[in-house]
Amino acid sequence: MKTRFKLGLIALSVTCASAIQAQDYPLKPIRLITSPIGGGNDFAARLVAAALTGPLGQQVVVDNRPTVLIADIVAKAPPDGYTLLLTGSAHWIGPLVEKVNYDPIRDFAAVTLVDRAPSVLVTHPSLPVKGVKELVALAKARPGEINVAVGGPGSSNYVAAVLFAHMANVNLMRIPYKGNAPAIVALLAGEVQVMFSSAGAVAPHRHSGRLRALGVGSSKPSPLAPDLPPIASGVPGYEAEALHALYAPAKTPPAIVNRLNAEVGRYLRSQQAKDVFLKAGIDPVPSTPEELVQIMNAEVARLAPVMRAAASK
């Protein structure tokens, strides 16, 4: 009985200590780790950092690091809320095809989903297709001859391309690029014929006629690209989108996680956030920590067989 009483006191003291720590949080600047400047991770990270700085009363500093290092840095950081991670869906899809030093779910405390944007399928105008079904027919007639620009394994455009090839039963030649921007440059130059990108990144080029858009990766028509039909109209069941989310190291006190979730969610629901994100072709979508974990698990279950099959080819 005494042992139980002592264990209860210990548990109570730990809980109280965590509550006190969260109540005082933050007492110093917070570091938000993300990918190099210019990409989708960096775009979302800077908006989140600016949104948190005021309400938290401390500077939230964006720390740009090589993408391959960011998750590992945060996984090994003290779980005190002073080192955070903003990254995309490659965080949980990449480990399906590449060995990493962390578990994307177990080694992190999910804070909130930040945004999501359906992939847009674009082609170079020289490719003689004007719709998804025409592209599928051409790819089947010319197996392996059509090049598609992709990022690293697990990146949103890599996943979108691999999933498209799998579901349409076509052979596209994947050409890797270090990021979305150089891939778009290559597509504009005609080095590749096909690419999957966010709506905002390719909007100026498709409206000028330098690129041709065939469809959007949402299951239904998207307000982010209202003039485009779903890719699923030509490849039934197809759905691909880019997501960004915020994390802390595992074992970060729940009160700190909840405080961060509340402040980011408040910003993402504001008209100011909607105006900025939607202008970039992205939909701000906050979530609870539990909802974010559910999304990650569901995406891993859906995409794991496809990603592993692609990696083995």
Image (spheres, grey):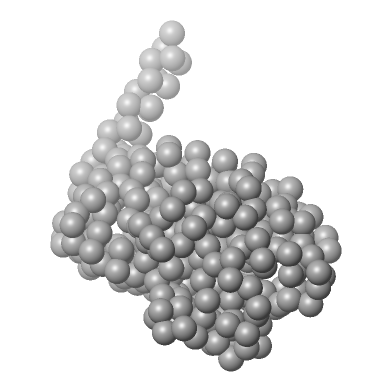
Quadrant of the rendering where the N terminus is positioned? top left
Q: Is residue 260 above or below residue 202?
A: above
Residue at x 46% of width, y 62% of height: 228
Residue 85 at x, y = what percent? 43, 60
Looking at the image, which is closer to me, 245 or 145? 145
Looking at the image, which is closer to me, 171 or 292? 171
Quadrant of the rendering where the C terminus is positioned? bottom right
Q: Is residue 207 left or right of residue 71?
A: left
Residue 204 at x, y = what percent? 39, 80
**Residue 78 visible in the displayed image:** no
Looking at the image, which is closer to me, 199 or 36? 199
Residue at x 36% of width, y 44% of height: 287
Residue 192 at x, y = what percent? 66, 82
Image quadrant in which you'd find residue 246: bottom left
Looking at the image, which is closer to me, 134 or 200? 134
Q: How many marks?
A: 0
Q: Is residue 55 left or right of residue 238?
A: left
Residue at x 56% of width, y 57% of height: 231
**Residue 213 visible in the displayed image:** yes
Residue 165 at x, y = what percent? 71, 61
